[in-house]
Amino acid sequence: MNILIVDDARDMQLILRRILTLMGHQVMLADHGQQAWNLIQQHNFQVVICDWVMPVMDGPTLCRTIRDADLPHYVYIILLTGMSGKQNLILGMDAGADDFATKPIVREELEVRIRAAQRVLNLEHTLEEKHRNLESVNQSLSAAQALIQSDLKRAATLQTGVLPVQKMFGRLCVDWFFQPAQYIGGDTFNYFPINDELLFFYSIDVSGHGISSALLSMCLQTLLSSTGELYCVDELTRTNAARFPSRLAERLNYHLNHTLDTGDHYLTLIMGVVDTVDERLYFVQAGHPQPFLYNPITQRVERVDCTGFPIGLLPDMEYETIDLPFPPGSRFILYSDGILELQHASGAPMTEDDLQERLQALSALPARLLVSKLGEQLGLGRAGEDKPDDISLLTIDFCG
């Protein structure tokens, strides 16, 4: 090791240098603390052995100077002193000394203390190496995390991009809100006209949230599209509109259980058809939250009492189509259970009754304004604010 001896007594310098040189170390000498500090800034010393009492700068002052400095490596300090007592030991430790040796110096004692210094410095070197390796790993992880977040943001843009844009279909007015719990989520929905008389729609909530749920929801978008594997335009007519939702739900359930590998995922949904000629609403409910229907006669928002088993849990399930009148002025409201996981400002959880009251208070507004106002009331759409679960809301108005 490179060792610096600091002592104002020449004979002590020579004795220490002789002992340490025979032990195989490289040694330099300094007459006082200031000279030693100048040398420390120019050379890489692992150990400093310094006297306590010296002119210009004493030992404790040199210790504090070394500890206060931003040196690139650790310096092990051994203080030499002829003074005894606990108070002196405490003062030396407070100044930054690592060890002490008493004068007159004994060779065997010095050898033991140098070996102890070597062990400490080796440990320090090992810790520095591990720290550098950890910093390298952390940098790699940070870069990977930044790449993943960038990809997730792009994926979120793509997921939102597949949601429908058109919101007017003759006398039907549609609007919606969508906010994943994180970047991407398992909620999805769609609607499109079959012809001038029929509008097909669905709202889906895939279990869980995150990448796997989002991928399944994107897959369902493809399966249920007008050109998808499970759906054919020719099959949906006004004649069979009342049977179509249940048949399609059964077909989708079979596909998830026997064809598509969904892992542990399942889904809830409401899927149906609006017939603007017969002024009827046909839909199937499969584990989704109970929807709301605004009745233009009573001018009340009513909860539709319906139940159904989620899709993808058990094969060969049967589903029932619900048939309701849907005259002009009616409004059908679908939502995922993420809304019910929100909290009031007081911390109390949101309930279906709370949501029904809010929808009733906003019932006079057109779909676009209702969705906007409800989103404001529920604190939705705030940038950088994650929600407990994915949130989606879909409203279908039969305008007068």
Image: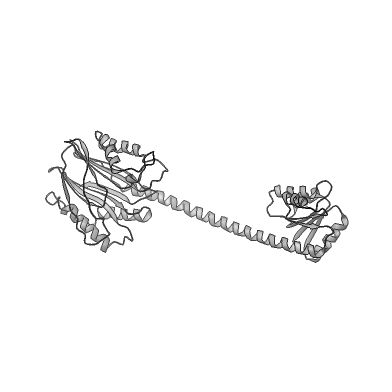
Residue 6 falls in image quadrant: bottom right
User: Measuring 24% from the left and 57% from the top, which residue is drawn there?
Assistant: 252
Report whether residue 231 is seen: no
How has the structure been colored for display?
one colour
> How many dots with numbers?
0
Q: Given the current orientation, which residue lies at the most extreme right position?
A: 11
Query: Is 377 drawn above or below residue 115 in the view shown?
Result: above
Report whether residue 113 is seen: yes
Query: Residue 331 location, x and y as percent?
Result: 21, 40
Query: Residue 390 location, x and y as percent?
Result: 35, 48
Query: Residue 225 location, x and y as percent?
Result: 24, 52
Query: Residue 151 location, x and y as percent?
Result: 42, 52
Query: Is residue 205 left or right of 104 when viewed as pictured?
Result: left
User: Measuring 11% from the left and 50% from the top, which residue is drawn there?
Assistant: 239
Query: Is residue 2 left or right of 273 when viewed as pictured?
Result: right
In the picture, which quadrant includes the N terminus? bottom right
Looking at the image, which is closer to me, 362 or 85?
85
In the picture, which quadrant includes the C terminus? top left
Residue 280 falls in image quadrant: top left
Query: Is 249 drawn above or below residue 108 in the view shown?
Result: above
Residue 246 falls in image quadrant: bottom left
Q: Given the current orientation, which residue lies at the most extreme top position?
A: 364
Looking at the image, which is closer to me, 196 or 129?
129
